[in-house]
Amino acid sequence: QVQVVESGGGLVQAGGSLRLSCTASGLTFGDYAMGWFRQAPGKEREGVACISRSGRNTPYADLVKGRFTISRDNAKKTLYLQMNSLKPEDTAMYYCAADRDGYCSGSSWSTVPEYQYWGQGTQVTVSS
């Protein structure tokens, strides 16, 4: 049984930083591309970043480029999202997802149907 679990969310002031973590069990972690998504109330879930199984390909959404960094530790089966210079508009539920494609291909990396396994999310709230 596959389990994906996010952690590290919380309340932070604008300009601050948070690091999210995601662990995945029940799958061969190193074979999967991993993505971070977020969903604000009343909005669609949107792709934030993806990291290929090797770690060499890391596309980002334009809104977070230069502020967020995705990384992974395959030995620990853990995915990370370092978020710096946070803004109130970054407030959302953040989700981790696994894609057996492995490559963060083209523009499909940012689409929900591309991923097979999802966590329950961790809330990030940025106050102004």
Image (cartoon, helix red, strand yellow):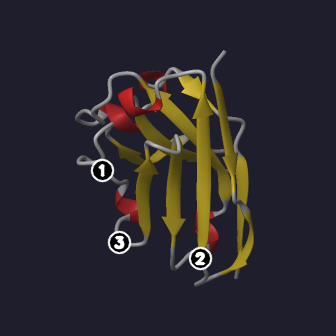
The residue at 53%/34% (across/down) is 97
The residue at 22%/35% (across/down) is 106
- Tell which of 43 and 124 is nearer to you: 124
What mark, if any, has residue 66 been given in the picture? 3
Task: Decide which of tag 2 and tag 1 comes sooner along the chain.
Answer: 2
Disc 3 and disc 2: Cα gap in Å? 13 Å
What mark, if any, has residue 58 been given in the picture? 1
Dividing the picture into quarters, in which one does residue 118 lie? top right
Read off the residue under disc 2. 17
Instruction: Specify the quadrant that holds the C terminus.
Output: bottom right
SS under mark 2 = loop
The amino acid pointed to by label 2 is Ser
The x and y percentages for residue 19 are 59, 65
The x and y percentages for residue 71 are 41, 55
Q: Are marks 2 and 1 in contact (CB under 8 Å)?
A: no
The amino acid pointed to by label 3 is Gly
The amino acid pointed to by label 1 is Thr
**Nearer the viewer's eye, disc 3 or disc 1?**
1
The x and y percentages for residue 81 are 51, 58
SS under mark 3 = loop
Q: Is residue 60 left or right of residue 89?
A: left
